[in-house]
Image (cartoon, rainbow, N blue to C red):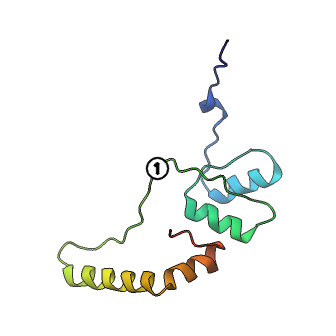
Amino acid sequence: MQKAIINYEKDVTRYERITDAFNDLDIGRIKAVVIDSVVAYYYKKQNPEKFDIAPAQLEREPVGIALRKEDKDLYNEIQKILEQLKKDGTIAKISEKWFGEDITK
């Protein structure tokens, strides 16, 4: 059995602005967009009749908050607040509002 050799790189289009990629996807110029999941869920929420998300995780990309190393009290306070927001369901509610589902799981 012979295997097909496909050069995917020749079929990749890079965009300066993600809005251009989604416009091309919408009009059928391209077939898919590989993008950060947060942005994908936002676009899906804004246009549920146009876009869907194929569940694929190329890599885990944590989200962070940058602080100066010496701001340890601020770091601890942020951690405490984030844990409370997660515990009381506020983060899930924010995710539902902006993305149409809880993407924090």
In the rendered structure, the answer to whether residue 84 lies left or right of residue 1 reads: left
Question: Could you say where residue 16 lies in the image, as x and y percent from the top left?
Answer: 59, 52
Determine whether the residue tagged by mark 1 lies in a helix, strand or loop: loop
The image quadrant where one finds the N terminus is top right
Closest to the observer: 46 or 59? 59
Type of the residue with mark 1: Glu
Q: Give the tally of numbered discs.
A: 1
**Image quarter of residue 70:** bottom left
Q: Which residue is rendered at x = 58% and y = 73% of the image?
A: 102
Closest to the observer: 48 or 66? 48
20 in relation to 48, above or below = above
Question: Could you say where residue 15 lies in the image, as x and y percent from the top left?
Answer: 62, 49
Q: Which residue is rendered at x = 63% and y = 72% of the image?
A: 99
In the rendered structure, the answer to whether residue 102 lies left or right of residue 11 reads: left
Question: Could you say where residue 51 lies in the image, as x and y percent from the top left?
Answer: 75, 59
The residue lying furthest to the left in this view is 70
In the rendered structure, the answer to whether residue 79 lies left or right of residue 22 reads: left
8 in relation to 18, above or below = above
Q: Which residue is rendered at x = 71% and y = 56% of the image?
A: 22
Closest to the observer: 69 or 80? 80
The residue lying furthest to the top in this view is 1
Q: Residues within 10 Å of mark 1 (few under 14, many from 20)?
A: few
Question: Could you say where residue 58 lies in the image, as x and y percent from the top left?
Answer: 51, 47
**Image quarter of residue 81:** bottom left
According to the picture, the residue beneath numbered tag 1 turns out to be 59
**Image quarter of residue 66:** bottom left
Q: Which residue is rendered at x = 74% and y = 44% of the image?
A: 31
